[in-house]
Structures are given as C-alpha cells and as structure tokens.
Amino acid sequence: MDVRNCPKCGKLFQRLRRDICPACAQQEDKEYEIVRDYIYDNPNSDVQTVSEETGVAVETILKFLRENRLINVSEALLLDCELCGSPIPSGRFCKECGEKLEKEFSSLNTKKDGLNLPKSDKKASFHFMRDRLVKRDR
C-alpha cells in the first residue's frame, strides 16, 4: 500500500494511478475538459489566452500538453523541447532528441550486459529477521 500526501492539497491518500488525491484528480479532469473544449472551439488561441478565458492555470495547461493529454494543432500553443529548445506540439522532447535519448539508453543497456559482475558464492544466503529473533536448531 503506497500512502502519500497530495502535492496540491496536502491530504493523505492511497496512490493508485496518479500522484494526486482523488479529489484533486477529479478537479484536474474537469479543468482538462474545459481546456480541451475551449481549444476545440478556438484552435488558434495561445496558452495565456486559454488560461485567461478558462480560469485554468498556465502551468496546468502546459502539463496537459507535456503529458500528451492535449494534442496541439496550433502554432500558438507550441512547447519547447527540453533538450534543444525547438518548438514541439506536445510531449517533452522533439523527435530528434527522443531518438538520440533512445539510442543512448539502449547503448547503456548493452554496456550493462557486458559488465563482469562477481558471481555470488553458494554459501551466501538470504537473512531474515525471524532468524535473529528465533534461535534455530541446526
């Protein structure tokens, strides 16, 4: 059971799928629907205008774009790639930087497979707390 404090409201909640409590998640979903409907009706609006007209914070709108919840068709709502700074419609990285990161991670995995890690000896075993508490007959 993963119990956390909600970063938005501070309430204690059991984390299932999202990093915020159910009440904040429901509020965020309502904000998403408001923003989605506004962008559908006004496709050439920029982030600031969408925020002013809907009452949803700019950071929240940018979060929706970064999480690919909103697919951007307007150049007014472009984000910046986190690596090179080029304009992108959604997500965190442009196609080129994403491919570059993917290659780097795959090369790390192949290097990791090639490491000569020491083999454990057969005498080594797992130790459990009950072994410390209860003396066993051997």
Image (cartoon, grey):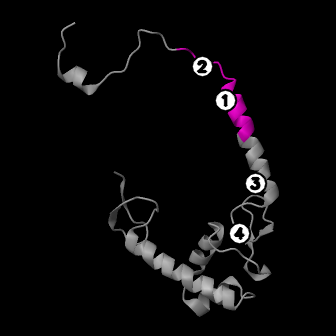
Q: In the image, which is nearer the foreground, mark 2 or mark 4?
A: 4
Distance from the alpha carbon under mark 2 to that under mark 4: 41 Å
Residue drawn at point x = 75 percent, y = 71 percent: 89
Q: Secondary structure at mark 4?
A: loop
Labels 1 and 4: the sequence-earlier one: 4
Q: Secondary structure at mark 3?
A: helix
Q: Nearer the viewer, residue 130 or 10?
A: 130
Distance from the alpha carbon under mark 3 to that under mark 2: 31 Å
- The reply to whether the magenta stretch includes residue 110 is yes
Q: Amino acid at mark 3?
A: Gly
Check disc 2 and report the residue beneath it. Answer: 117
Q: Nearer the viewer, residue 115 or 23?
A: 23
Distance from the alpha carbon under mark 3 to that under mark 4: 13 Å
The magenta-colored residue range is 106-119
Q: Secondary structure at mark 2?
A: loop
Within-10-Å neighbours for mark 1: few <14, some 14–19, many 20+ = few
Q: Quadrant of residue 128?
A: top left
Q: Amino acid at mark 2?
A: Leu
Check disc 3 and report the residue beneath it. Answer: 98
Distance from the alpha carbon under mark 1 to that under mark 2: 10 Å
Labels 3 and 1: the sequence-earlier one: 3
Q: Is residue 2 left or right of residue 106?
A: left
Residue drawn at point x = 33 percent, y = 68 percent: 11
Check disc 1 and report the residue beneath it. Answer: 112
Q: Secondary structure at mark 1?
A: helix
Q: Amino acid at mark 1?
A: Lys
**Numbered tag placed on residue 90 in the rendering:** 4
- The reply to whether the magenta stretch includes residue 39 is no
